Amino acid sequence: MPSTGRLERNALRLMLVVAIAMSARALYDVGVAAGLGPVLAAGLPVILDGFAILAARVVTRLSGRAATYPWTLLVLLGAVSVWANALHAHPVTVGALTLTTWQAQAVAALPPVVLGFGFHLTQMVSRADAKAQVPEPEPAPDPTPEPGPEPPSRSPYEVAAREAWLHHGPMTGAVLAERIDSSLATGKRLAAKFRTEGADPAPVTTEE
């Protein structure tokens, strides 16, 4: 089933085609009545309604002072087209219905008016569809670096033993146990560990 946006676009296109055809017929008759002849009169709808549509397309792409000139052309050409369509009108009695001259002119002026509004709505729908198709930008990555692994936690005995080892150099497990006031087994274990790690052990933190 067609989407709502597709139905809107197709309906607007149909109305634009009908409005162009109705306005073109009136402008053609005005051209013939002005003495342009059957061939050249066919160009009058092109240079009026066609140029107005072109100016409307340019207006949608410009803004500020740059859009002043195409806006001026659009208003002037639209006004001439409305006037020419109204000039073509003449009352025709249909059954019991008879319009006045100004009523017939008002009805005849509707096609170029609908053409202008319909084209503008078409441009609005197209811009809305284009905006809806643009993917949303992905969020920027967090510039804050992820924290690295925390240094291993050490016991108070190991912290004191490392400080003694770094300040006084390698020593036996018994001497190390005496310096940190620990058991002989703890001193021997830490001394063996420090010899395995090397003379420059990694920084440590104390357990809470």
Image (spheres, rainbow, N blue to C red):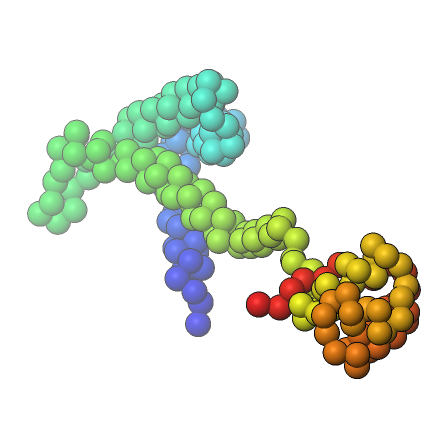
Q: Residue 127 location in percent, x, y?
A: 47, 45
Kindly give the residue lying farthest to the bottom in the view shown.
Answer: 185
Q: Residue 2 location in percent, x, y?
A: 44, 67
Q: Which residue is drawn at 21% across and 33% down?
A: 106
Let me know if residue 185 appears in the view.
yes
Based on the displayed image, in which of its 4 quarters is residue 150 positioned? bottom right
Q: Which residue is drawn at 19% across and 39% down?
A: 92
Q: Which residue is drawn at 32% across and 35% down?
A: 113
Based on the displayed image, in which of its 4 quarters is residue 5 positioned? bottom left
Q: Residue 167 location in percent, x, y?
A: 83, 54
Q: Residue 200 location in percent, x, y?
A: 86, 58
Q: Where does the N terminus fall, quadrant-wise?
A: bottom left
Q: Where does the C terminus fall, quadrant-wise?
A: bottom right
* Numbered label tally: 0
Left or right, 113 with respect to 159, comes to left
Let me know if residue 51 appears in the view.
no
